[in-house]
Image: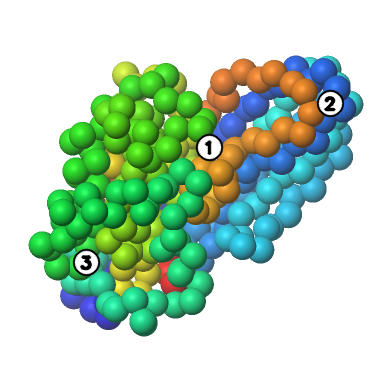
């Protein structure tokens, strides 16, 4: 897709979020956390703070595959709390959906090709026939990808506790229920089956209905169409411009918010948000746009 000054626009949001994690650690344990806001050309971290109790040493490293920022720490045992807070600005590239068209696979950048293939939770090969039966009569582009997203939303019921950490896209389809990661996995599997490089994104989402439960981490899909990545969230529970990127990967196996190497127990994460509004600076509150939304170029 070519950038057209008539068909494209830019918006900015600024959101403050905090995450608090609590563990009871029974043996010396290493932790890898993925809670830091991503730093990209479209997402800027204005300020951030890490607080560990007890105050053990830690490092924050950027892994090379997707650029995710990982917090690494080790504690010998006892109660361990991890706090992270950030003030983040996101720039949204938005376009007329009709102008977002797909090119041939031969023109895809090499860096996106790994998101075409099946992965642990996204069994593209198992849903390929269904994907082409349902959507093969549509032209390749944003409208086809959005139709897949709406199809997933219509068939899967959002139900906390209906799935586990090992639930796959195919199991979600068969069960007809799941949480955000399950919606994302099924969307990804279907879009990859239609030849869209599609990846799994974790983050936090400002603006979800409080009736769905307390704020939590969120997951959604991102498909490469034309010359950039476009956001698709089959849950529809929050505005696309209210999403803050944390981690990006092939599926949830790549971007768990916490990985423990030892024996410990944990409580539910505590997540909170505040959105800024500053019209004079061009900063708006998150909303549900009618345009296609991208927060990542090629």
Instruction: State the image coordinates of residue 11 (x, y, percent, origin top left).
Output: 33, 59
Q: CA distance from mark 3 to mark 1?
A: 33 Å
Q: Earlier in the sequence, mark 2 or mark 1?
A: 1
Dot 2: element: loop
- Please report the residue visible at 82 percent of the width from the left and 30 percent of the height from the top: 29
Instruction: State the image coordinates of residue 142 (x, y, percent, origin top left).
Output: 22, 62
Asked if one can make out residue 186 in the rendered structure from this viewpoint, the answer is yes
Asked if one can make out residue 294 in the rendered structure from this viewpoint, the answer is no
Q: Which residue is mark 2?
A: 54
Q: CA distance from mark 2 to mark 1?
A: 22 Å
Q: Which residue is mark 1?
A: 17
Please tell me how many numbered marks the rendered image carries.
3
The relative height of residue 70 versus residue 20 in the rendered view (above or below) is: below
- Please report the residue visible at 76 percent of the width from the left and 43 percent of the height from the top: 72
Q: CA distance from mark 3 to mark 2?
A: 51 Å
Q: Which residue is mark 3?
A: 141
């Amino acid at each position: 897709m070519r950038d057209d000054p008539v068909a494209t626009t830019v918006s900015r949001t600024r959101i403050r979020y905090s995450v608090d994690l609590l563990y009871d650690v029974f043996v010396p344990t290493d932790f890898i956390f993925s809670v830091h806001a991503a730093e990209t050309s479209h997402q800027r971290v204005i300020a951030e703070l890490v607080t560990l109790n007890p105050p053990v040493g830690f490092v924050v490293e950027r892994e090379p595959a997707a650029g995710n920022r990982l917090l690494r720490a080790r504690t010998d045992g006892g109660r361990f709390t991890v706090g992270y807070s950030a003030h983040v600005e996101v720039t949204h590239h938005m376009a007329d959906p009709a102008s977002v068209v797909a090119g041939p696979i031969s023109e895809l950048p090499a860096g996106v090709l790994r998101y075409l293939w099946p992965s642990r939770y996204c069994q593209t090969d198992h849903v390929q026939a269904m994907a082409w039966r349902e959507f093969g009569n549509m032209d390749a582009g944003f409208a086809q990808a959005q139709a897949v997203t709406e199809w997933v939303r219509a068939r899967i019921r959002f139900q906390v506790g209906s799935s586990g950490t090992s639930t796959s896209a195919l199991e979600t389809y068969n069960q007809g229920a799941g949480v955000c990661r399950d919606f994302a996995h099924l969307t990804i599997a279907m879009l990859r089956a239609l030849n869209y490089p599609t990846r799994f994104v974790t983050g936090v989402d400002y603006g979800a209905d409080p009736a769905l439960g307390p704020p939590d981490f969120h997951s959604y899909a991102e498909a490469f169409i034309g010359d950039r990545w476009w956001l698709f969230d089959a849950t529809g529970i929050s505005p696309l411009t209210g999403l803050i990127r944390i981690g990006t990967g092939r599926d949830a196996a790549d971007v768990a918010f916490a990985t423990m190497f030892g024996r410990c127990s944990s409580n539910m994460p505590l997540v909170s948000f505040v959105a800024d509004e500053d019209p004079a600076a061009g900063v708006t509150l998150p909303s549900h746009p009618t345009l296609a939304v991208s927060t990542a170029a090629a």
